[in-house]
């Protein structure tokens, strides 16, 4: 009896949120799945049920496969680099004897408060082939033969974009790690140094294990962030060029939905991307699972 | 206690149901509100049937206008002139740079505006979607009717070729579904001052164009640049070139019929060869592929390249951009392959149309007729600084447009042939966009990774896929 009353009360408490959640999240998301089974222009007229045809076509669509590959590349490379860097920066700032700590913290965090569009424009000028600082610096150092059209070559464009994503997100995760490091008891480090552990061993044996739960969360955040931010950055910087070499799944979806008036197909892309990122998140969750005792 | 909870729970369910109902109601209400601005709905209440001209059943017209380079002042002016000329009529004008995204839900909800003007390059895809769905009103009768000025049929006032073009007759069945508004002229641009100083003539053939490479090297400039990450601008060269080589027949094959065999033709290979030659002989400005339209156009104006393709809006678009000393815009059109011909240009038309779901088609048609009065053409020049696709419009509005823009229109009126062509709609169920595939390849061609033949082969496959879905 007690229990029943209790769950009734809980249900009552979560009701408003549940209703709003269903209207604004569950309903639209389920519509994405539903619409992906149709061939439609997104205007209500002429909707034809095609079953899984959109999905079957997807996996023979070269542009889509390229865009999925590119998205996968960014999802793999960007989190690894930016989280590693964030960890290193955070530990240096937290344990190092730097006087300008506060300045560095601000500088590293700065990109996170800039709008993504601004970042895209900024970096497209940094990479500018004729007046960008990257090529100018190379020329200045006498490395003229290494100057390149960074965003115009198939071989460099994705790395160039990955670098922007790393630059954008490192500071954000660094601040999260800094907060986590503040919570690690100082005694652990004292004890370790008495036992003769150097700072590298302290980092790997104390800091990382103590931060493990935060790291797990940031991995998921980072994978998701890449998915979303890459859309803006690619749209602003390369529009998917050269010849789709930097197309990511979401820019391709947008193109299909809004430039090609091919809504059903775009929804099929959305479904695949959705499943793709869920699976990635699950895998990373499983791989990083540890017993904390 | 338990029964109390039960009742409470039932009440909660009831409340949430009410909430959902209320929600759906308010969304409808707000939608109507954005549709008819509040003031106009007051007008509707105060309007008594006795004071209307009884010519039209519905006296309220909803107009949605894109607010872009041409601004929205023309539509405001046209609205008041129209209301003056038709007492009792109320025009609800909604204009916004994102008008496409704003009216999309209205169209989906079956509550579409009566008249829609969207930019030709609008990103929302509304026009394209409506054409695909065959959801536009056939307005051929407007052009077959006497103009409001009383000086002949409206179709005779429109620029030749405009109504027959894919822009206005998207299905190629001889019926007009979209009304031409402003038109634009596109081709290659150069720095007039430089050409005069150096004694260079603007090229009229491709051979003359290529020959300028030596001069360009001497001047330490590249011959050509284009809007790298927006390679679609290159249609300003490709479409006239195809027309020049293969005539309207080849152009229709490429743009409307999506005939794969077109890409096996000499015409196609020779037209694509322009870009291959530019790439292979080092005529392209370094780094072009990675630049967006503003960046590449700025490079051109700063004297790093001799030519760039663009439209008559160029001078206005780049008004604030840095440029080399003495820079003056010069319009060269597009060179031809035959020395006996003058250079050509590409023309495109902005579209105004009536969606099928409009609830006031008659009045909407009257509004479109009104748009072609001389007064409206002048208003358009004054407020939008645009040139309507009406004979002699350039002279009517000369005071209001930039010099280079007037010159390009004048060049066309004086005999430079303006080809109009745009990619036709692909059939339902085609998941590729042939136009973007076509121009996406340019980057690889320019980087030297692809030949014209390979390019044509890719297009052959793409067109074959489109063809398979055509009846």
Image (cartoon, rainbow, N blue to C red):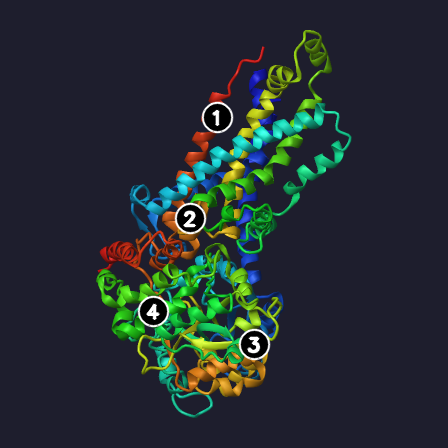
Left-right relation of A271 to A185 = left
Q: Nearer the viewer, mark 4 or mark 2?
A: 2
Residue B308 visible to an observer of this rendering? no
Please state the horizontal and vertical placement of residue B89, each as a whole percent of the image.
54, 78
Mark 2–mark 3 distance (CA, rounded to whole Å): 39 Å
Picture disc at residue B328 = 3
In three-dimensional space, the C-alpha distance between marks 1 and 4, rounded to whole angstroms, equals: 50 Å
Identify the residue at image location x=43%, y=64%. B233
- How far, Cα to Cα, is label 1 from label 3? 59 Å
Residue at the extreme top of the image, as rendered: A195
Measure the C-alpha gap from mark 1 to mark 2. Answer: 26 Å
Q: Secondary structure at mark 3?
A: loop
Q: Which mark is residue B170?
A: 4
Q: Is residue A205 above or below residue A10?
A: above
Q: Tell me whether marks 2 and 3 sit on the same chain.
A: no
Q: Which mark is residue A252?
A: 2
**Are the numbered discs 1 and 2 placed on the same chain, yes or no?**
yes
The residue drawn where x is 47% and y is 59% is: B123
* Chain designation of label 3: B
Task: Name the mark nearer the viewer: 2 or 3.
Answer: 3
Toward the viewer: B286 or B468? B286
Q: Is residue B201 visible?
A: yes
**Which-is-in-front pick, marks 1 and 4?**
1
Q: Earlier in the sequence, mark 1 or mark 2?
A: 2
- Secondary structure under the numbered disc 1 in the rendered image: helix
A105 over A32 or under it: above or below: above
The reply to whether callout 2 and callout 3 are in contact (CB within 8 Å) is no
A209 above or below A31?
Answer: above
Residue beneath label 1, please? Answer: A284
């Amino acid at each position: 009896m007690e229990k029943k009353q209790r769950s009734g009360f809980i249900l009552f408490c979560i009701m408003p949120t549940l209703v709003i959640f269903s209207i604004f999240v569950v309903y639209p998301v389920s519509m994405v799945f539903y619409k992906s089974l149709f061939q439609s222009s997104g205007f209500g007229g002429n909707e034809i049920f095609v079953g899984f045809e959109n999905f079957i076509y997807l996996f023979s669509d070269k542009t889509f496969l390229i865009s999925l590959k590119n998205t996968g590349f960014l999802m793999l490379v960007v989190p690894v680099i930016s989280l590693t860097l964030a960890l290193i920066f955070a530990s240096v700032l937290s344990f190092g004897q730097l006087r300008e700590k506060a300045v560095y913290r601000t500088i590293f965090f700065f990109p996170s408060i800039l709008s993504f569009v601004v970042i895209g424009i900024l970096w497209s000028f940094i990479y500018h082939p004729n007046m960008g600082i990257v090529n100018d610096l190379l020329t200045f150092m006498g490395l003229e033969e290494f100057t390149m059209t960074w965003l115009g070559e198939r071989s460099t464009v994705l790395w160039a974009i990955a670098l922007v994503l790393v630059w954008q997100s490192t500071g954000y995760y660094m601040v999260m790690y800094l907060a986590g490091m503040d919570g690690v008891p100082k005694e652990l480090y004292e004890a370790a140094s008495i036992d003769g552990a150097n700072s590298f061993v302290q980092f790997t044996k104390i800091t990382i294990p103590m931060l493990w739960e935060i790291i797990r969360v940031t991995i998921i955040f980072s994978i998701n962030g890449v998915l979303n931010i890459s859309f803006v950055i690619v749209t602003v910087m390369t529009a998917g060029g050269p010849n789709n070499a930097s197309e990511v799944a979401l820019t391709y979806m947008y193109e299909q939905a809004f430039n090609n008036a091919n809504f059903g197909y775009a929804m099929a892309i959305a479904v695949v991307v959705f499943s793709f990122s869920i699976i990635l998140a699950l895998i990373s969750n499983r791989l990083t699972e540890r017993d904390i005792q | 206690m338990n029964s109390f909870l039960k009742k409470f729970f039932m009440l909660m369910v009831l409340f949430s149901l009410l909430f959902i109902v209320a929600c759906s109601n308010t969304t409808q209400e707000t939608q109507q509100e954005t549709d008819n601005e509040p003031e106009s709905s007051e007008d509707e209440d105060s309007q008594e049937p006795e004071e209307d001209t009884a010519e039209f059943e519905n006296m309220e017209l909803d107009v949605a206008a894109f607010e872009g380079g041409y601004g929205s002042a023309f539509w405001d002016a046209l609205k008041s002139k129209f209301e003056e000329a038709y007492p009792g009529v109320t025009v609800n004008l909604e204009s916004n740079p994102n008008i496409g995204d704003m009216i999309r839900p209205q169209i989906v909800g079956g509550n579409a505006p009566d008249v829609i003007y969207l930019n030709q390059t609008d990103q929302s895809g509304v026009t394209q979607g409506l054409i695909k769905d065959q959801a536009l009103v056939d307005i051929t009768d407007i052009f077959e009717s006497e103009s409001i000025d009383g000086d002949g049929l409206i179709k005779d006032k429109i620029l030749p070729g405009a109504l027959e073009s894919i822009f206005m007759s998207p299905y190629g069945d001889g019926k007009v579904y979209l009304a031409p508004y402003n038109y634009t002229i596109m081709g290659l641009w150069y720095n007039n001052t430089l050409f005069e100083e150096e004694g260079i003539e603007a090229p009229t053939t491709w051979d003359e164009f290529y020959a300028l490479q030596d001069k360009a090297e001497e001047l330490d400039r590249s011959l050509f640049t284009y809007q790298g990450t927006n390679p679609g601008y290159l249609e300003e060269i490709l479409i006239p070139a195809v027309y020049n080589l293969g005539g309207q027949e080849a152009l229709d094959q490429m743009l409307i019929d999506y005939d794969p065999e077109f890409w096996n033709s000499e015409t196609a290979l020779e037209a694509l060869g322009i870009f291959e030659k530019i790439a292979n002989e080092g005529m392209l400005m370094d780094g072009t592929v990675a630049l967006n339209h503003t960046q590449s156009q700025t490079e051109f104006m700063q004297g790093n390249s001799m030519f760039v393709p663009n439209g008559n809006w160029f001078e206005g678009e780049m008004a604030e951009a840095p440029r080399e000393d003495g820079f003056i815009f010069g319009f060269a059109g597009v060179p031809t392959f035959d020395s006996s011909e003058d250079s050509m240009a590409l023309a495109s038309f902005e579209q105004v149309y009536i969606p099928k779901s409009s609830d006031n088609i008659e009045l909407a048609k009257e509004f479109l007729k009104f748009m072609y009065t001389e007064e409206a053409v002048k208003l358009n020049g004054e407020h939008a600084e645009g040139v309507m696709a009406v004979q002699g419009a350039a002279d009517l509005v000369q005071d209001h447009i930039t010099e280079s823009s007037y010159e390009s229109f004048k060049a066309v009126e004086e005999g430079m042939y303006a080809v109009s062509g745009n990619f036709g709609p692909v059939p339902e169920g085609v998941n590729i966009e042939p136009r973007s595939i076509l121009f996406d390849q340019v980057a690889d061609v320019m980087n030297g990774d692809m030949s014209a033949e390979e390019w044509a082969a890719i297009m052959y496959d793409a067109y074959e896929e489109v063809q398979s879905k055509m009846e």
